[in-house]
Amino acid sequence: MQHTLYYIHDPMCSWCWGFRPTWDALKRLLPDNIKVINLTGGLAPDCDEPMPLAMQQTIESYWHTIQQQLGTEFNFDFWRNNQARRSTYIACRATIAADYQGAQEQMIDAIQRAYYLRALNPSDSSVLIQLASELGLEPIKFAQDLSSPATQAEFKRQRGLAHSLPIQGFPSLVLKTDTQTTKIAINYLDASSMLNAIHSL
């Protein structure tokens, strides 16, 4: 019997980056009858305005907290080298545009690495198109899909579904079986506790 495990995230969510190694480990351990579906919940709508300094300092402090608690690597040059904007919806749409070319997981990975390790800004469409090229995707098609009505509609659908599920922010895991829809408690450092919870359901 097939069940669905929803992973609700935003590729520019720093706690999702912190969760990444454990999430990868959990996916490797999942039984074959669990289908993983990525849902982009969307942290921040499109915005061309510079991020206020106080917000930049707050988000950078989150990075330090995650680094201290989880050992996650961050490149803090991002805050010195970029004009930060509170705008993540475009990165979410990039994962959908990449999915049309069979590269959703690769694009999620590329966005996270660009943002957190390479100090690039995924709020910029030029950066996202660069990442698509680096992944070997067709860049013109990707650029068109990034802003297409179809991608906008799919992102709206994903966001709506994500927020209809029993989540508490990003990242969240929700298991849907024939009889119930259940939130799986996130453990940032140990995949086994989440795997046990999934098996018990």
Image (cartoon, rainbow, N blue to C red):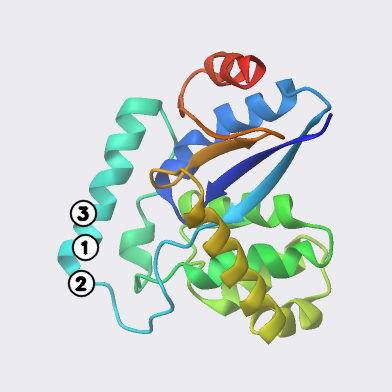
Q: CA distance from mark 1 to mark 3?
A: 5 Å
Q: Which mark is residue 58?
A: 3
* Residue 11 visible in the current orientation: no
Q: Which mark is residue 52?
A: 2
Quarter of the image with the C terminus is top right
| Residue type beneath disc 1 | Met
Q: Residue at x 31, y 83 (%)?
A: 49
Position of 163 with respect to 61 (left or right) is: right
Q: Read off the residue under disc 1.
A: 55
Q: Earlier in the sequence, mark 3 or mark 2?
A: 2
Q: Nearer the viewer, residue 145 or 131?
A: 145
SS for dot 3: helix
Tag 2–tag 1 contact (CB < 8 Å): yes
SS for dot 2: loop
Label 2 neighbourhood size at 10 Å, few (<14), some (14-19), many (20+)?
few
Q: CA distance from mark 3 to mark 2?
A: 10 Å
